[in-house]
């Protein structure tokens, strides 16, 4: 888990530094087609702006998911950009804030819808004629009809 941010400690204008490596289990994801097996690196800082808590965060890790072409599990690096979150005082219970779900959600948003082995699956070549036909049919569903008309 990430260190808890204690609001009282930030009141004198202090900054809470975040620089942690968390085990993959931190993500609390257990799915056959989405696996977190690498540590999660999180960096950032938290401070107060008025009565709001401001958190700058950045995180990266790797996920394993099935290749869209060959269906083998493939590893894809994911990273969140630098993001700033503002937390209203009423969302903070007993003057302590846990940034865990912020990080989890930010990383899950970065999981790609489709993955492919090393960016280009070796089996893509084998499937190429098939894929090209599919793409062609998708883009020009009436092209064959038209050809028949013309001839
Ligand atoms: Zn593949």
Image: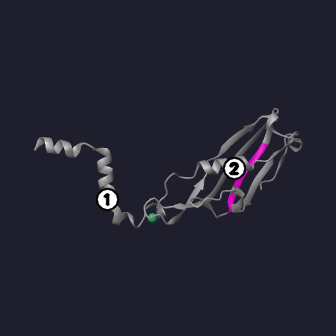
Mark 2 Cα within 10 Å, few/some/many (few <14, many 20+)?
some
Residue 89: mark: none
Of residues 151 and 48, the one drawn nearer to the viewer in this rendering: 151
Tell me if residue 107 comes above or below residue 89 in the rendering: below
**SS label for mark 2:** helix
**How much space separates mark 1 and mark 2, taking CA atoms?**
40 Å
What count of labels does the image hold?
A: 2
Mark 1 Cα within 10 Å, few/some/many (few <14, many 20+)?
few
- Residue occupied by mark 1: 130
The N terminus sits in image quarter: bottom right
Report the residue at 74% width, 50% height from top.
100
Where ligand 1 lies, by image quadrant? bottom left
Tell me if residue 26 comes above or below residue 56 in the rendering: below
The C terminus sits in image quarter: top left
**SS label for mark 1:** helix
What main secondary structure does the magenta stretch of the protein show? Answer: strand
Residue 103: mark: 2
| Highlighted range, magenta | 39-46
First-in-chain label (1 vs 2) = 2
**Any magenta on residue 20?**
no
Residue 24 visible in the current orientation: yes
């Amino acid at each position: 888990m990430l260190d808890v941010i204690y609001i009282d400690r930030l009141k004198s204008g202090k900054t809470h530094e975040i620089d942690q490596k968390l085990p993959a289990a931190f993500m609390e994801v257990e799915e056959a087609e989405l696996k977190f097996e690498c540590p999660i690196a999180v960096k950032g800082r938290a401070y107060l702006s008025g009565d709001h808590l401001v958190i700058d965060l950045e995180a990266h890790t790797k996920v394993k998911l099935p290749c869209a072409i060959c269906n083998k599990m493939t590893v894809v690096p994911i990273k969140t950009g630098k993001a700033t979150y503002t937390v209203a005082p009423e969302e903070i219970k007993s003057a302590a804030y846990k940034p865990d779900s912020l990080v989890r959600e930010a990383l899950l948003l970065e999981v790609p819808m489709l993955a492919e082995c090393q960016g280009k699956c070796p089996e893509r070549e084998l499937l190429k004629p098939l894929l090209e036909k599919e793409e062609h049919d998708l883009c020009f569903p009436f092209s064959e009809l038209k050809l028949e008309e013309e001839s």
